[in-house]
Amino acid sequence: MSEDIVLELENIETCYGKIQALRGISCTVRAGQIVTLLGANGAGKSTALRTISGLTRASSGTITFMGEDITGMPPHEIVELGLIQVPEGRRIFKGMTIRENLELGSFTLKDDVERGKRMAHVFEIFPVLHERQHRDAALLSGGEQQMLAMGRALMTKPRLLLLDEPSMGLAPFLVKEIMRIIVRLNQEGVTILLVEQNARVALQLAGHGYVLETGRIVIRGDAETLRRDETIVKAYLGE
């Protein structure tokens, strides 16, 4: 395994009961990349992220993170290695303050000084969270909840960030803001695996992409090549 490979999936198959959701997928994410998984609803994109993060168990195949086999490893141990998922739908803790949500994201940190540094960094990236840190997270707008979900993930200082549909349900101006933040995080050294229904936006951000169809990877390549691929254009870019 090359030293710059952060994540590698080899022939991963995942089933929900008798239904096979992933069918032998293999892909690679290298350090510093933004890689995107594209596909229609039900193609297996979210299942792929859940399988990587240990929330759903692979039926067969191997998942390697930073040179370590994490196949079948419990999710909390995967988090401790620095592989963090921001789930679809944000999944913030309502009834708790914004600050309390962020503190929950830092459960792997033992050093209070480091926790404070991470909190300050999150507040610098998301000023609105700093301004409203003592408010109930339930009072945030959809875009602000997405920022909180991302901020919570950043509290762990991730080595790889899995983002599941970060633009879902957001107004266009908020989509631009979320994507700007994703680029910034990547420039700060966070490697990102992005699942995004908006293929045009995803291919503008990513350097490399994979297209899933009924649980199989059917197309792969650099983002520029995918943007020119006639199949991608017709199926996902609406042209």
Image (cartoon, rainbow, N blue to C red):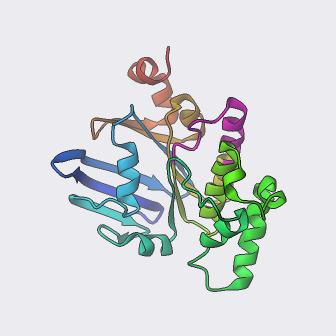
In this orientation, which residue lies closer to the viewer: 132 or 220?
132
Who's the residue at 59% across and 61% down the image?
A: 93
Q: Quadrant of residue 110?
A: bottom right
Quick check: 211 left or right of 103?
A: left
Residue 206, horizontal then vertical, whole percent: 55, 41
Quick check: 114 left or right of 232?
A: right
Who's the residue at 29% across and 69% down the image?
A: 72
Q: Is residue 173 magenta?
A: yes
Residue 91, horizontal then vertical, whole percent: 54, 55
Residue 114 to residue 158: above or below: below
Magenta segment boundaries in residue numbering: 164-181
Res 148 visible: yes
Residue 27, horizontal then vertical, whole percent: 36, 50
Residue 120, horizontal then vertical, whole percent: 78, 68
Toward the top, the furthest residue is 239
Q: Quadrant of residue 215?
A: top left
Who's the residue at 49% across and 17% down the image?
A: 238
In this orientation, which residue lies closer to the viewer: 78 or 95?
95
Res 147 visible: no
In this orientation, which residue lies closer to the viewer: 92 or 38?
92
Q: Is residue 12 magenta?
A: no
Quick check: 180 left or right of 192?
A: right
Toward the front, the furthest residue is 95
> Quadrant where the N terminus lies?
bottom left
